[in-house]
Image: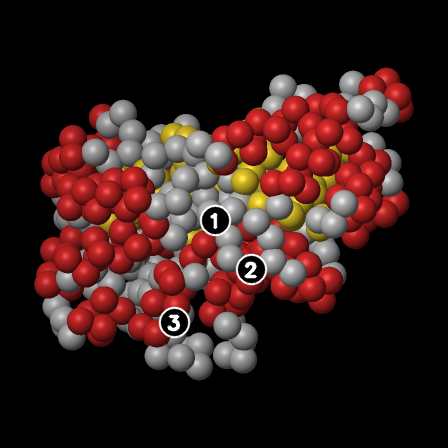
C-alpha cells in the first residue's frame, strides 16, 4: 500500500482530498435512460447543455451513449453506441476547455472517444466487462474511473464488499500498466440489487460508510443524481421530483470523503458540495523535503477504520484490533520510510508505551520504502521525535534516503499542524 490521499489527475484536473471537490456534469445520449429529461438528442443540444454546465462551474463533462441501469433492459449494439457518442465527443472536446469523459464498458467505444479528444474513461464495469479496455486506457495514457462491479457476499457488510471489488479493479489496472495517479474509484450507487438487503438500504449504507474506501488510496467519485434509492426513501416515483434529495445525498457523500460529484444538476450541486466541503474534517497532510509523506488521521478514521487501514497494510487483523482497542490520541500515517528505519521506529515506539504498525514484510528489513502507522499520545510522539533527532544511521545516509532526523523534523511539523 502506498500513500493515502495521493494527488490524482482526472483528464489533467487535480482531484483528491487536498483539492476542491470537483463537479462532473452528465451529458446523456441514451433515450433508454431512467431520467428522461436528462437525454439530449442532437449535437447542438449537447453543446448548449454542456456549455451551461461549464459556465455554472462543472470541472468535467461525462458523455454516455448507453444506459447501464441494472434494473432496465438497455442493451444496444456497440456500433449504435459509437454512432451516438462520436459527433458529441468530437464537438465538445473541440469546443470546451474542460476534460471530456466517456461513460462506457466497451473498449471500442472508449477508443473511438479517446481518438476524438476525450481524456477520461469511466468504466462502470470496473475493467471486468471487456478485457481490451485496459490496453486502450494504458496505450492512450487516459485517466480512468473504475466502478465497483461484480458479485457480492450477503454475509459481509456492504462497504467491505465494495472495497474488495474496487481493490480487484485497481489491481487489474495497475498490473496492466495504467498509472495509479490517473485512477479514481466509484462505489456504484444504484448498481447493486442482489445483495441480501433492499437496494436503497445498500446504497444508504455505502454513503454512510464512504470514508472506509479512502484507505484504497484513490479519490472517490459519487453519482447519486436523481437515482432510485432517493425515490424509494422519499416516496418520489418520478426522477423529476428528486432534486432536493439528490443534493442532500451529494452533500453527505462529500462530508464523508467524496472528491468528485457526478450530477445532472450542476448549479444546485455546487452549492451543496461547497458547504459540505467547508464543514467536513480537514486533512492534515505533509510532504517533507526528504520524500517522507505524513498524514494525520485523527479526524478522519474511527477505530474500525484504523483496523481496516492496518489490514490494507498487511498487518495481522487480530493484532490490529488489539492495537486499536487500547485507545489513542494521535494517529499518523507515514509513507516513504526505509524498512530498516521503520523497524527501529516501531521498536522505539513500543518501548515508550505507544503503538506502531508496519507491513509484515518489513521484518525482512532492507532499504525499500514502506509505510508505518504511529498511534499514541502527543507525549509518546514527542519522546520519539527526541530519540530520532539524536539518531543518524550511516547506512541510510550513504544512500541519501530519509533518515531518523528527517522523520523527527517531519513528525514535529505534522504535530504542529494538528495543533492549529
Q: Is residue 226 above or below residue 349?
A: below
- Crowding at mark 3 (Cα within 10 Å: few <14, some 14-19, many 20+): many
- Say what secondary structure mark 1 lies in: loop
Label 1 to label 3: alpha-carbon separation: 23 Å
Residue name at image x 29 percent, y 34 percent: 59
| Frontmost residue, 356 versus 7 | 356
Asked which quadrant contains residue 231, the reply is bottom left
Q: Are marks 2 and 3 in contact (CB under 8 Å)?
A: no
Label 2 to label 1: alpha-carbon separation: 10 Å
Q: Is residue 286 above or below residue 271?
A: above
| Frontmost residue, 312 versus 14 | 312
Query: Left or right: 162 with respect to 393?
Result: left
Q: Mark 3 sits on what residue?
A: 202
The mark closer to the camera, 1 or 3, is 1
Q: Mark 2 sits on what residue?
A: 303
Q: Mark 1 sits on what residue?
A: 300
Label 2 to label 3: alpha-carbon separation: 22 Å
The mark closer to the camera, 2 or 3, is 2
Amino acid at each position: 500500500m502506498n500513500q493515502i490521499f495521493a494527488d490524482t489527475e482526472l483528464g489533467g484536473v487535480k482531484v483528491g482530498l487536498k483539492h476542491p471537490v470537483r463537479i462532473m456534469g452528465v451529458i446523456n445520449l441514451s433515450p433508454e435512460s431512467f431520467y428522461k429529461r436528462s437525454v439530449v438528442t442532437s449535437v447542438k443540444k449537447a453543446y448548449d447543455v454542456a456549455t451551461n454546465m461549464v459556465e455554472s462551474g462543472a470541472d468535467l463533462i461525462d458523455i454516455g451513449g448507453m444506459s447501464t441501469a441494472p434494473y432496465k433492459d438497455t442493451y444496444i449494439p456497440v456500433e449504435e453506441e459509437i454512432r451516438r457518442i462520436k459527433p458529441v465527443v468530437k464537438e465538445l472536446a473541440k469546443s470546451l476547455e474542460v476534460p471530456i469523459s466517456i461513460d462506457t464498458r466497451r473498449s471500442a467505444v472508449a477508443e473511438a472517444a479517446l481518438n476524438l479528444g476525450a481524456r477520461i474513461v469511466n468504466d462502470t464495469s470496473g475493467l471486468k466487462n471487456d478485457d481490451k479496455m485496459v490496453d486502450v486506457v494504458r496505450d492512450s495514457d487516459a485517466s480512468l474511473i473504475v466502478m465497483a462491479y461484480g458479485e457480492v457476499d450477503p454475509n459481509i457488510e456492504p462497504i467491505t464488499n465494495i472495497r474488495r471489488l474496487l481493490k480487484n479493479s485497481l489491481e487489474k489496472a495497475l498490473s496492466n500498466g495504467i498509472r495509479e495517479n490517473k485512477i479514481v474509484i466509484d462505489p456504484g450507487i444504484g448498481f447493486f440489487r442482489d445483495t441480501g438487503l433492499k437496494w436503497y438500504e445498500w446504497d444508504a449504507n455505502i454513503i454512510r460508510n464512504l470514508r472506509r474506501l479512502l484507505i484504497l488510496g484513490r479519490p472517490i467519485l459519487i453519482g447519486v443524481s436523481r437515482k432510485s434509492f432517493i425515490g424509494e426513501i422519499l416516496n418520489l416515483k418520478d426522477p423529476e421530483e428528486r432534486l432536493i434529495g439528490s443534493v442532500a445525498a451529494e452533500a453527505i457523500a462529500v462530508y464523508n470523503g467524496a472528491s468528485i460529484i457526478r450530477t445532472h444538476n450542476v448549479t444546485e450541486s455546487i452549492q451543496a458540495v461547497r458547504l459540505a466541503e467547508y464543514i467536513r474534517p480537514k486533512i492534515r497532510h505533509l510532504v517533507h523535503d526528504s520524500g517522507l509523506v505524513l498524514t494525520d488521521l485523527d479526524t478522519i478514521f474511527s477505530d474500525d477504520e484504523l483496523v481496516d487501514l492496518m489490514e490494507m497494510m498487511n498487518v495481522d487483523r487480530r493484532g490490529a484490533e488489539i492495537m486499536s482497542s487500547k485507545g489513542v490520541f494521535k494517529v499518523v500515517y507515514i509513507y516513504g520510510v526505509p524498512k530498516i528505519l521503520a523497524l527501529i521506529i516501531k521498536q522505539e515506539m513500543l518501548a515508550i508505551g505507544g503503538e506502531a504498525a508496519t507491513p509484515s514484510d518489513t521484518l525482512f528489513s532492507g532499504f525499500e520504502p514502506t509505510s508505518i502507522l504511529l498511534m499514541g499520545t502527543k507525549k509518546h510522539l514527542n519522546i520519539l521525535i527526541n530519540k530520532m533527532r539524536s539518531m543518524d544511521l550511516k547506512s541510510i545516509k550513504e544512500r541519501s534516503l530519509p533518515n531518523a532526523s528527517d522523520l523527527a523534523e517531519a513528525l514535529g511539523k505534522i504535530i504542529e499542524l494538528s495543533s492549529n
